[in-house]
Amino acid sequence: MKIVLKLILPVLLVLVNVSCKKNSTTDGSPVVVPDTTKPTISLVDPTASKIITLGTSMHLQMDLSDNVELKSYKVTISKSLKGVTTSDWAYTNTWTIPSGKKTLAVNHNEILVPLTFTGNQVTLGNYDMLITCTDLAGNEATSSIVVVFSK
């Protein structure tokens, strides 16, 4: 029995030592696993093809989440013309998310859709709305819908 223990004990110690070192580099520092997971966006409002009345604030409601930490979200709204740049009203704003947050429930009316833009009435019709959420590692997720501007 003593001989078996003398043979097994060193093997067990080697196994424990090797398994403990799997989570560290050769110099003993911890292995850093990069965050490659994109955040998620769950848009609640506006819904696709929602009619937005000129001169009112657009309601924005969504849930953002990330496996490590969120950094910011950006909303861009522009006239739907299949990539053609126009002089129509457009909107872009970025919000910074407080540090340490893995989830954020967004619920605000901060986006004002004006009646006029540079002296002319805002063009009625379809507008592309793009939401981009970025996590602390720089991973981005996007969600897009079309909203309709009306009088």
Image (cartoon, grey):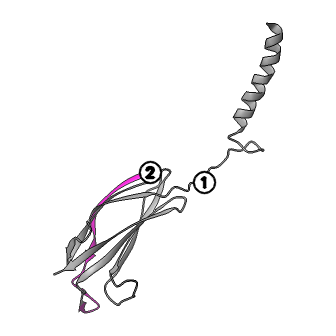
Q: Main secondary structure of the magenta part?
A: strand
Q: Which residues are magenta?
A: 102-120
Is 66 covered by the magenta stretch?
no
* Residue identified by numbered label 2: 102
Q: Is residue 54 visible?
A: no
The vertical placement of 36 against 151, above or below, is above
Amino acid type at mark 2: Lys
Q: Quadrant of the N terminus?
A: top right
* Residue identified by numbered label 1: 34
- Label 2 near label 1: C-beta < 8 Å? no
Q: Residue furthest bottom?
A: 119
Q: Residue at x 51, y 55 (%)?
A: 37
The vertical placement of 93 against 5, above or below, is below
Quarter residue 41 falls in = bottom left
Tell me if 59 is positioned left or right of 34 in this view: left
Is 106 covered by the magenta stretch?
yes
In the rendered structure, find residue 12 and report the number of the disc placed on it.
none
Tell me if 118 is positioned left or right of 28 in this view: left
The vertical placement of 100 against 111, above or below, is above
The vertical placement of 28 against 63, above or below, is above
Q: Residue at x 40, y 52 (%)?
A: 103
